[in-house]
Structure formats: structure tokens, C-alpha cells
Amino acid sequence: MSNEQKHDEMSKYELKRLINELEDIRGRNTELVSLYIPAGYDMSKISDFVTSEASEAENIKSKHTRKNVQAALDKIGRKVKEEQVTPENGVAFFSGNVSDTEGRPDIKVWEVVPPQPIESRHYRCDKEFVLEPLKNMVVDDRVYGLIVLDKSEAAIGYLQGSNVKTAYTLDSNVPGKTRAGGQSAQRFARLRKQMLKTFLTDISDKSQQAFLPKAREGKLLGIVIGGPGFVKDKLVEDDYLHQELQDKVIANESIGHSGEGALKELVQKAEESIEDSQAVKEKKLVNEFFDHLKSEDGKSEYGVQQVKKALDMGAVETLLISEDVEMYEAIYNCPQGHEETVYEREAEIEDSRECSECSEEMDLEQMSHIVDAFGEKAEEMSSELEIISTEHEEGQRLMNMSGVAAILRYRIR
Ligand SMILES: [Zn+2]
């Protein structure tokens, strides 16, 4: 390779795994170093900064801590020196002692080029790594739709991760029960009814604007409705919602308030339904896979090679990958133009191998986690990809079947 710098941005999946790894590391003392650098920073100044922090660390009283912090900074300092310019999204470094045995340090360093830009410079030495900026990059872009309403007001919003965002707020003109003098009771009741109808239609329109595009992208996980009184039930029971959205309703909850402030109250109330809905979906898919497998109708495949074959043919309806699968796809090329793909754990992947066709040496061209490799192919083939948790029994069953499985559109053998 030339001296041009190699900066492979991490994919979201890779970053997620790294966050999990770093999150589990705890320092005995404040000895874990995190350093975030946005794009455009002068790396030689960062290098000076790291050097000065290392000399600052002389003042740390505990000998072990002092040594560990200095060693961590030293490792980061060397990495910084290798960089001439910051990568397009900036770069983050993490370093510290990962050894469990006191007095026998094992100083590790990680360099991360994230999939999204780092917003601000950040340095900290603590008992744990600072991971918030990275975590914000891997927030799932799938949402739950929220509708809170009573007869006087409504709010439409999203739940994304643990954040609640408001999309629309609406006020109704539905008058209270006391009518103005001179109006006939019947006429008044009719008017109220009409106004409520208009209000519910407005809510439906706004819900459609907010949720339908998400639903069609496959990013609407469900809709939760709530509010005090009967109006919320009317919205559901009288079919005000667009049919595609109606099918997505997972809960209808009674809560004390309406309006924007009640969106959070609704999320709390519906927490179980929300958690269940994802698990229910996963379990259903895994069971569907096992049903096909049992009935031998040819609409199931499992194991990385078989699934890859089906995926390449475009035969996969839904790709199921267990969150615990730790397998990588490695692509090798030889000078004669032969290509071979190998699936292994990361540690097993060699830089080169012998070509099975011409015996020349093959170089490792590309390596990616199976979720990334298969996820990309799935997108190309319009196959659904579902990452399956191992926290339920079905997820465990899938993991026991290699953790990689597919429900097929049609049989292929
Ligand atoms: Zn060859």
C-alpha cells in the first residue's frame, strides 16, 4: 500500500459491537482514557496535547494508576503521530488497562473512525470510557408512532430509542357540554358530533403524514395510542386511521392526560407492549423458520454457506441473524483473478491463503462482519434482515442452528 492513509469507516453494526466491548471495561481507578477529535483538527497539536497530559499524569499519587494512565496516553500518542490529517468524520481513541490482575497491566488501544462525524473535541480519564458520542451514532432509526388525544387536544410523536419527539400538536374546536343559550339541544349535539368527527379526521391525516412514509420504509415498529376518555377508542374502532397504520396499532392505553406532555406518560404506560412487540416479531419469525424446516417445504435454509447461496439468488424473503453471531466474511483474490470467500471468526482470518484453483498466493481483499456483508446483499435483493436477540428461547434456538437462517420466497432445491 502507498503512504496514503487507510481509513475504513466503521459500519453501524461494527460500531455497536465495539461499544459493547468498550462498555464492559472498567478501570480500577480513573485510568481509562477517551479522546475524541472532530475532522479538521491539527494532529500535531493533538499530539502535543497528549504529551502534556502524560507529563501532567506525573502528579497522580497511586503508582499503578500513574503508570497505567501514562502507558495509555503513550499508546494514544503513537497512534496520533501516525495520522497526518484527521479522517473525514474525525477519529476517537480509547486506551487503558484491561487486565484483571493488579500489578500486571495489559494496556490496549482502540482507534475508531466512526460512520458519522464527531461533533466536538473531548478528553477524559475515568473509570470507564466515554461512549455517549458513539452511542448517539448507532441509535436505531426505527420508531414507534405515538398518538395521544382527548376531545380537546392531540399530540402525534415518535419514540426512537428512548427519545420521545413531537411531530404535530392539534387543538379541536369541539365545544364543552354546556351549550350557549338559545341553541336547540339536538342541534348542539349534532354540531359537537360533527366537530369531533372533523377533529378525528385531522388527527388521522397528521398521523398519516407522520407515520406512513416510515411504515413503507419498514421503519415503523408499531403505533401506540392513548389518552383519557373515549375519544382514543373512537379513533381506533371507527377506522379513522389509514389501513396500513391501523394494522400497526399495538396498544391503546388509558392515561391521565392528553396533549404533548402526555406523550412520555403514554410511553411509560405502554412500555411492556412496546418491548413485547419487538420480541413477539422476532419469535414469530424464528418460529416461521422452524415451521418451514420441520415441514421440509424447502422454504428454509440455515448455516452461513447455504444462506449466502440463497441470498445471492434473491430467494431470501427474511434473513435472520442472531445478535451473538461473531462471524466474518473474508474475500481473497489471487493474481490469476480467482476469488474465494471464507467465513470465520475474526481471529481465524489470515492475511493470505493458497488459491485452490492455481495454488498461487491469494491476498485478503475485504473483511466484514457477517451482518454487514449479508445486510448489504439483503438490501440489494430486497430481502428483510432481522437481528434476533438471544434473550428469548426462540433466539437461543436460532443460535443453536448456527445463528444464521433464512425464510425463502420459493424453494431452491
Ligand atoms: Zn488462483
Image (spheres, rainbow, N blue to C red):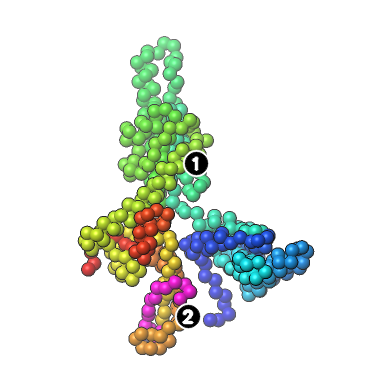
144 w.r.t. 190: above or below? below
Q: Residue at x 43, y 43 (%)?
A: 272
223 w.r.t. 335: above or below? above
Instruction: Using the rendered view, name the quadrant where residue 147 is placed.
Output: top left
Confirm or reject: label 2 Cβ below 8 Å from ligand 1: no
Q: Which residue is drawn at 33% across and 71% down?
A: 305
Q: Which of 6 and 374 is in front in this view?
A: 374
User: What residue did someone put label 1 on?
Assistant: 166
Query: Horizontal and vertical percent for residue 287?
Result: 30, 54
Mark 1 residue type: Thr
Query: Horizontal and vertical percent for residue 64?
Result: 71, 66
Farthest residue, direction top: 182
Q: Residue at x 37, y 14 (%)?
A: 185
Mark 2 residue type: Asp
Is 346 in the magenta?
yes
Is any atom of residue 369 visible in this view?
yes
Q: Are marks 2 and 1 in contact (CB under 8 Å)?
A: no
Give whichever of discs 2 and 1 has the lower sequence position. Answer: 1
What segment carries the magenta color? 334-348
At mark 1, the secondary structure is strand
Q: Residue 34 carries which label?
A: none
Is any atom of residue 88 visible in this view?
no
Is 225 in the magenta?
no
Quadrant of the image containing the C terminus: bottom left
User: What residue did someone put label 2 on?
Assistant: 351
Left or right: residue 31 versus residue 214 is right
Q: Residue at x 43, y 62 (%)?
A: 324
Question: 10 Å neighbourhood of mark 2: few (<14), some, or many (≥20)?
Answer: few
Instruction: Using the rendered view, name the quadrant where residue 404 is placed.
Output: bottom left
From the viewer's perspective, is the residue at label 2 or at label 1 nearer?
A: 2
Q: Nearer the viewer, residue 381 or 97?
A: 97
Q: Nearer the viewer, residue 55 or 283?
A: 283
